[in-house]
Image: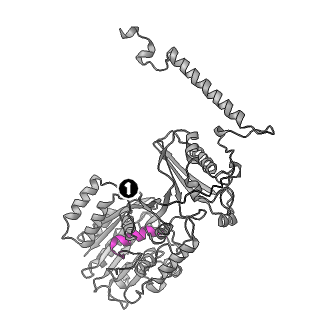
Amino acid sequence: PLLFLPRVMVGVPGCMSRAQRLQRCYATSRRRRHYSAATSSSCVSDGTAIRSNSSNVLSSANVTDESIPPLESFSLFASCLPGLEPILYKELVDLGLEPEAPPATRSSRKQRWKAESSRDKDKDTAESSSLQAQVHSGAGGIGFTVRSVESILRCHLYLGTATHILLRCSQPFKARGMEELRRKVSKMLFWKQYLRGANSNTGPKAPNLDIRVTASKSRLYHTAGIAERVEQGVLGALGVDPNESTSIHTIDDSEERKHQYPSVKLLVRVKNDYVQISVDTSDTPLHRRGYRLQGAKSPLREDLAYGLLFGSGWRRHNYANNDEMLRFTHLLDPCCGSGTIPIEGAAIAAGVPPGRLRSEPMSGSFLADELLWKRLISDAESNLKDVGSTVCVFGSDRDRGAIAASNANAERAGVSDLITFKRCAITACPWLSGRHGVDAATDGKLLIVSNPPFGKRSSANKDVYPLYRALAERYSSLDRGASLSVLAQNIDAVRKATAGLHPHVLFSSRHGGLSVVAMHCVK
């Protein structure tokens, strides 16, 4: 009997009943009448017409409402390299914050069980495993909430493994069309609370925006169109004429304008039809400390060096207050390159914050406070520890240019008096044999942290096993209590060279487009 039913009732695609066709025609006629009325009402007295809301241009005056409430709480997201989330989580806890730990996964539950069942092992190993259990890797950062601008500035000053600190403009919202996106962005109160726009006496009438867009698995996929609609929505919320914008297509790259009117970077992420808009509160990534102006071959990122030191045990608990001494007294990097690991290690030992050389965050917004930023740096410098007689940091490399770059970078970082650099190979390193006036080989408090060549760029197609083996042999001759940490790309070569030393993985991450693993040995 189904064969005699109308085609529309059996679900044949492309067929509509007469009632459905009439309903569609009625809806179309209503949209046309609404568009004509909106267009006619947008004409001005001199005969010229301004574009309607469908063309994304405002006809309202500048916003001068002084009753806009200030921001009372700030939802932040500290991003980092993949694999460094547990260390970043511990840093946030040490700053007195309450970060949002992601839900436990199957792998993290297994790591928690291993941490509880390995109490007879080394203390650092158990602590690292439990920390990995609290926060799973792969999220790319940690979310947290603060209630003051000072807390945001302290994060910029003291976090060593963070690369960006993003301020969430709102909760993720759904948008499946360009006009819907523009409309919802224009209704956000955040823009009047944060940006120096039309309601500011200082700065240009239109804010200098730098909009970056990523889109996936959504109906909104044209990144340039999304950036344009977000810009129009922001300017609409501020009451600014879009023709005065200097954001996307007509941005002025002159150094004078950048210094006088810094740009505000907006990060727009569209996924599964949901839009998340954030403000990057720093002008440049946080791992760029500002001291490494001279580099060597394949330099190590500062945040990765900081995470390697932190995970190896070279750290202060509650680092911002310097209330606990280091476990080790000697730090050595036999492949120092441009000196990143020794410089970061000396700064940690002296209590020097990582972001001390950076400019004030959140420039171009109402939250920028240069005086408060300078006061925090001054307070940190007044609390520096005099560790010259108790902590020794060494660095060596066989390249003469690398040693020269290391000395220059340490001088700019302000820790040159804590570091001793020497040109030599690993097999001739005096600090691995107890010479050079320092009995580091017998006191059991030596930490070796290094980033040897991967054999990919600076020494392409070169076997790195002999280098790892030479380092493992020198480490084996040290007394009990010394530790060794190596950042490697070839994990098989490291395991083979350190056979019998029982190395374990601190974390895995990416560096220079390569997958790297941090291995740690404890005697």
| Residue 212 higher or lower than 494, as above or below | above
Image location of residue 241, percent across then percent down: 69, 49
Residue projecting furthest to the front? 67
Question: Would residue 11 be visible to someone looking at this image?
Answer: yes
Locate residue 419, reporting x and y percent: 44, 83
Which residue is located at x 34 percent, y 80 percent? Answer: 324
Q: Residue at x 61, y 28 (%)?
A: 31
Residue 452 in sight here: no
Asked whether 112 or 121 is in front, the reply is 112
Q: Which residue is mark 1?
A: 138
Q: Quadrant of residue 202?
A: bottom right
Q: Give amino acid for label 1.
A: Gly
Q: Name the outermost residue toward the bottom.
A: 437
User: Could you tell me which quadrant the C terminus lies in?
Assistant: bottom left
Location of residue 422 by image quarter: bottom left
Q: Which residues are magenta?
A: 297-317
Q: Position of residue 306 (x, y in %)?
A: 41, 71
- Is 368 situated above or below 213? below
